[in-house]
Image: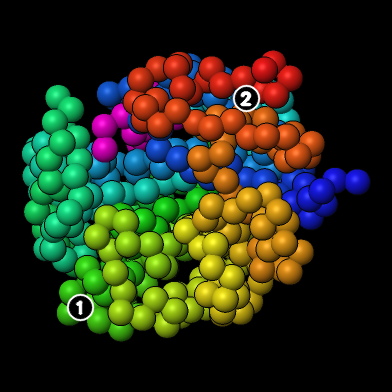
Amino acid sequence: MSLYPKLLSPTSLGAVELSNRVVMAPMTRSRALPNGTVPDLYQTYFEQRASAGLLMTDATMVSPQAVGYLGTPGIWTEAQVESWRAVVDAVHAVDGRIAMQIMHCGRISLNLLQPDNGPPVSSSAMRAPTTMLFTPTYEQVPADDPRALELSEIPGVVAQFASAARNAKAAGFDAIEIHAANGYLIDQFLRDGVNQRHDKYGGSVENRARLLLEITEAVAKEFGADRTGVRLSPTNPFNDMADRDPLGTFSTVLRHLARIELAWLHLASLNEADFSRRLRDAYGKPLLLNGGFTAAQADDAIRSELAVAVSFGAAYIANPDLVERFATNAELATPDSATMYGGGAKGYIDYPTLDAA
């Protein structure tokens, strides 16, 4: 009998059937080409890890305006769609399941990465004071001052996500996840530490959640709600984020999202049982959780119906056969931090499986 019978048991996230409840979390690996397409390395990388119940891609930009980092993939051109289709085909060839995560960086960007070198956009004209980003010459500099999105521009942002969902569906992905966490654009609207608006997208929680709900409804219309997920990070301070009442804010957000009947709700950086339980109760069903879980902790979270599945990030970098290692209680390899971001095959597709090692 497996040490982790719940974690390694099959389940479904909406319409997506999973062979186990181990999800590979979305991770920025910064290996996309300058035009936002993904190289052939991606096919190998995701195929190697396809024993996961569900794979999630790098956070993938919905438009040129969404870009905030070098080496991140996109999903707004036909060339990008075609490069991702090859990845999906490789995963499906070994009976894997894969979801695309889509995002807009918002204020976490530089003018020189934006169309026409314009300022990044956000909910409010408030710079992320301690966030540092790389220029194309790999100089590390502070994020630039953003401008607040005009009310008339917001439908265009929603349309960017809807278009990205159409393109991801055309590439053959099994599901899609909206990145509304970690201090990026949607999170910049959700949390009151950044959102200082006085229109229908600011002030009350319902107003601050409006952009997320509009984007989610638009993406679900394109991809199907039963194949759409949302990722949130209620307490993560990354990218200079804060909220005066994270439990109140995100309990309200989850109650609104519950009405859309999504495939999953993915809470990041939340290996905090009591907080997670209160959000689970607000949402009304188990969550997809992420946050430094061990296999034993993940199994316990699923057994207690706190989680339906658990996502693992860093562990998947050095352990392409993570599911098999959990199943045999094998030791996990440690990733090389020097090769996590950027570069080529080294530190990306050259970590051996347990059998090969």
What residue did someone put label 2 on? 48
Report how many numbered discs are placed on residues in the image: 2
* Nearest-to-viewer mark from 1 and 2: 2
Q: How crowded is mark 1: few (under 14 residues within 10 Å), some or many (20 or more)?
A: few
Residue 158, horizontal then vertical, whole percent: 34, 57
Amino acid marked by disc 1: Asp
Instruction: Give the CA separation, mark 1 to mark 2.
Output: 47 Å
> Considering depth in this image, is 328 or 60 the residue closer to the camera?
328
Residue 31, horizontal then vertical, whole percent: 37, 25
- Which picture quadrant has residue 80? top left
Q: Residues within 10 Å of mark 2 (few under 14, many from 20)?
A: many
Residue 355, horizontal then vertical, whole percent: 73, 19
Q: In the rendered structure, which disc, 1 or 2, sits on the residue that comes first in sequence? A: 2
Residue 118 visible in the snapshot? yes
Identified at 45% across, 28% down, the residue is 336
> Considering depth in this image, is 240 or 90 the residue closer to the camera?
240
**On the rendered structure, is 94 left or right of 179?**
right
Give me the disc on residue 199: 1
Overall secondary structure of the magenta section:
loop
Residue 146, horizontal then vertical, whole percent: 12, 55
**On the rendered structure, is 91 left or right of 112?**
right
Element carrying mark 1: loop
Display coloring? rainbow
Identified at 67% across, 17% down, the residue is 357
Magenta stretch: includes residue 65: no
Q: Is residue 68 above or below residue 228?
A: above
Q: Is residue 94 above or below residue 75?
A: above
Q: What stretch is highlighted in magenta?
A: 69-83
Identified at 79% across, 36% down, the residue is 328
Element carrying mark 2: helix
> Considering depth in this image, is 346 or 41 the residue closer to the camera?
346
